[in-house]
Image (cartoon, rainbow, N blue to C red):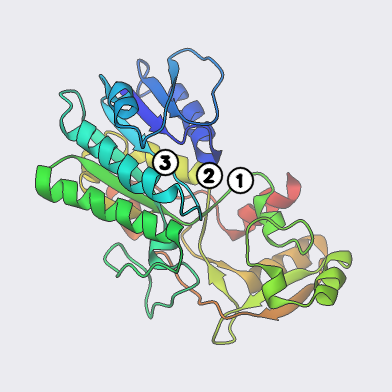
Amino acid sequence: MLVLVTGATGKVGRVLLDQLLADPRWPDLRIRALCHNRTLSARDRLESVRGSIADREAVEQAMAGVTHVIHMATVKEDPLSAMDVSVKGMFWMLESYRQSPTARQFMLIGGDCVVGHIINSYDSPITENSPRKPYPGVYALSKVLEEVMLEQYYVQYGINGCCLRAPWIMEKDDFRHVLDFDQQFGGPDWDQLLTSAQRTEYATTSKVPILLDSTGATLKRNFIHVTDLVNAMLAALDNPASRQNLFNIAMNQPVDYGAVAEHLKQTRNLTSVTIETPFHSNWLDNAKARQLLGWHPRYDMARLVDDAFNY
């Protein structure tokens, strides 16, 4: 079993490599990591090759003898390279895969940007059958194109593949800094919601934000801890139930910013501040993954918060 991994040097990739190599189900599993800008340290059963997935020759060399592909390489809001990586790169990988005599499974790691996460609204939980409604920007567009391209290879060539669609991925103290008014991780952009004076005040007094959605209710947003995502990937790997399927990989319930503030008040005596936003509360339904893959996330809101603040 030879697994080609793209994006192996990232947040998810590092955890995935450790788990794959330690999993007793595949003692002879080997990994080939296709790396572009960064490299990996040498390890038993791990081979690193250099190249861009936008380069057809590099992809074909990396695919030689591969049985499984786990494709995570991506580009954020960079119009100069996003299409090269997400469209051209995905095309070369799928073309090489479908013609390979050894290929058995192609796994794509997608994102909830394709359904607009908190930017676009839904009147019911978001399932795998919900319409794609990406928010504006090249990154969300590129992830939609990846999903559609993979689905068309099912239709046109009958390949065995699956897509795991994940929301915002957390590890270490990420979630603590999501709430930070000073050294914030990710979004929302406080400068779009607050004055500079408000942001300074909330930062110096260690306030916890209670974000409100467009209806005035506390915002509910989807997250996933990196270990839960990797466990879902391992559950889908070489699993016949994953064939040509799309799975939402999220916590059992979205994180409620009001519940987070109340938890931190009770456990750490932190006070909160209410912030109005134009965002929408959405629920990424993970029932399909739980049913077909036997996967269950280990992180709920309390554990996500406590681990981040204890890190």
Residue drawn at 24 percent across, 48 percent down: 150
User: Could you tell me which secondary element the residue under label 1 belongs to?
Assistant: loop
Q: Outermost residue toward the bottom? A: 215
Location of residue 213 in the rendering, given as x and y in whole percent from the top left corner: 57, 80
Under mark 2, the amino acid is: Val
In the rendered image, which quarter contains the C terminus? Answer: top right
CA gap between label 1 and label 3 equals 17 Å
Location of residue 109 in the rendering, given as x and y in whole percent from the top left corner: 38, 46
Which one is nearer the viewer's eye here, 60 or 250? 60
Q: Which residue is mark 3?
A: 72
Q: Outermost residue toward the front? A: 80
- In primary-sequence order, the first of circles 1 and 3 is 3
Location of residue 209 in the rendering, given as x and y in whole percent from the top left corner: 72, 71
User: Could you tell me which secondary element the residue under label 2 belongs to?
Assistant: helix
CA gap between label 1 and label 2 equals 6 Å
Q: Residues within 10 Å of mark 3 (few under 14, many from 20)?
A: some
Q: Which residue is mark 2?
A: 226
Query: Is 235 placed above or below 281 here?
Result: above
Which one is nearer the viewer's eye here, 205 or 119? 119
Location of residue 249 in the rendering, given as x and y in whole percent from the top left corner: 41, 53
Residue drawn at 63 percent across, 70 percent down: 257
CA gap between label 2 and label 3 equals 13 Å
Disc number at residue 171? 1
Left or right of 238 on screen, residue 11: right
**Image quarter for residue 276?**
bottom right
